Image (cartoon, rainbow, N blue to C red):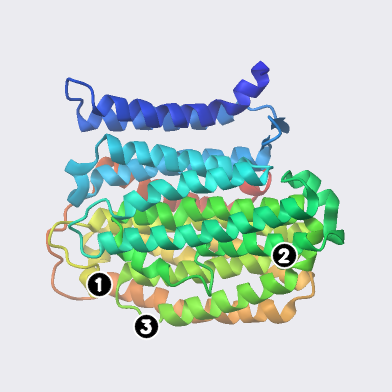
Amino acid sequence: MHSADLLGLAPFILLASGGLAVLMLGVWPRRVSTRTLMAVTLAFLLLAAAATLFWEVPREVGGMLVIDDLSRLFTLLFALGSAAIVLLSHGYAPTRDEIREEYLSLLLLATLGMTLLVASRHLLSAFIGLEILAVPLYALVAWRPARDGAIEGGVKYAVLAGLAAAFFLYGIALAYAGTGTLDLVALGAAGTGERLLPIAVTLILVGAGFKLALVPFHMWAPDIYQAAPTPVTALFASIAKAAVLVFLIRLLSLQLPQIWEALLPLLWGLALISMVVGNLLALRQQNLKRLLAYSSIAHLGYVLVALAAGTSLGQDAAVYYAVAYAIMNLGAFAVVAALARPGFGRGELEEYRGLGRRQPVLGLAMGVCLLALAGLPPTAGFMAKLLAFGAAVEAGHTLLAVIAVINTALAFFYYLRIMMVFYGLGAPLRDVTPPTKGTFAVVIITSLLVIGLGIFPEWLLKAY
């Protein structure tokens, strides 16, 4: 293997080595402190992020991975996002004493799965990345067994993830049966002339739909979001879903454009029902995490609006939306994690009443993230929707764009309801204390990024 190939594999090697190193430190004869374990974890994540800056792009590695601007951007996002999850986990009071080597090792391995997924140019490596991401998430959902619904949530996610893997593998089998290859470039050369290929890609899309919680594969999401510890929910709601989104973008728009065109009606339908169902179900929620889960389903519908355009502008809009989506949700759940304390309750919306007045920084950060999720300027959420809906109009899908705008207006209701609760009058929250420095840093940085990418979108649009 050439030295350039080893450099291309450096982020993956660092993440895999970090997962093993943290695990070994945890069983060292002399007890290693939790603070040291977290410092080592952060060091490996930051080294992996730094290694992407030395990538030679574009470049293929071993015929399985492709190193390009897209994989560089999202590998950097995943490494830094996972570092943010580590900081949130340390500040998350119910689990502070439980963040040990197993938890941190699983987080590093999940990050490895995300990076493999977005860099895959071969269906086999994509499946491996998807499973390396999924398996740690089973355990992380049920990390605190005493938590109400934790075991149920872990088992539910394991069953549905297994079903998603079955669809994905069936799609891979049909693709190989029809073309004799699993290489995405070779599959793209086969085009629509091979009748099994559109069916195979449809099955892969169904498997990815389960992972993304697109309607009608969405019923697990609210239960998992509520059952998991809040930092794990932040992982689910932000970078983990962004990884699957980027794989779909690479699969459909970059490698299989002919199949993309054939599947546009299916993407159109998935976008429509995900937007409508996600927003309508969010209107009825009284639990904040469940509300944000249904909100995420609607946002994934907006991403599909961009992909359903079937143009290069739609592809760029989908990539921009994936980044904005990850940052907006990470910021919102960082605030939720900062407020989670023993005895806080089940996270019902009313339990957050008055937060914006008593914790101004957290309230302001939540306000910024909610404005971004609602799609108001000058946030990244506004620019993401503008690009997505503009791509749909340019492609002649005016009706879909109009429906998306109506759904955006509908979403204002429940985002405004959260804002009114955060700044409303009411009894003081129980045991509300200032966040840790790490959590505070995540809250501030995500809020600044949400505004910065909205005002200067070219920062991101020129990065891929």
- Mark toward the start of the polypeptide (3 vs 1): 3
445 above or below 223? above
27 above or below 123? above
Cα–Cα gap, marks 3 and 2 = 36 Å
Q: Nearer the viewer, residue 444 or 143?
A: 143
What residue lies at 41% left-to-right and 67% top-to-bottom?
A: 221
Residue that label 1 marks = 348
Residue that label 3 marks = 284
Quarter of the rendering occupied by the N terminus: top right
- Mark toward the start of the polypeptide (3 vs 2): 2
282 above or below 328? below
Q: Tell me if residue 364 can be seen.
A: no
**Which amino acid lies under the numbered mark 3 shown in the image of this protein?**
Arg
Q: Which image quarter: residue 68?
A: top right
Number of residues whose C-alpha sits closer than 10 Å to that of mark 1, classed few (under 14), some (14–19) or many (20 or more)? some
| Pointer 3 with pointer 2, Cβ within 8 A | no
Which dot marks residue 199?
A: 2
Q: Position of 132 compared to 183: left or right?
A: left
Q: Residue furthest front?
A: 177
**Which amino acid lies under the numbered mark 2 shown in the image of this protein?**
Ile
Number of residues whose C-alpha sits closer than 10 Å to that of mark 3, classed few (under 14), some (14–19) or many (20 or more)? few
What residue lies at 67% left-to-right and 70% top-to-bottom?
A: 267
Cα–Cα gap, marks 2 and 1 = 43 Å
Which dot marks residue 324?
A: none
Q: Position of 103 compared to 56: left or right?
A: left
- Residue 8: horizontal and vertical position, in percent? 62, 27
What residue lies at 61% left-to-right and 22% top-to-bottom?
A: 7
Looking at the rendered structure, the secondary structure element under dot 2 is helix
Q: Position of 156 compared to 78: left or right?
A: left
Cα–Cα gap, marks 3 and 1 = 12 Å
Number of residues whose C-alpha sits closer than 10 Å to that of mark 2, classed few (under 14), some (14–19) or many (20 or more)? some
Q: Tell me if residue 45 can be seen.
A: yes
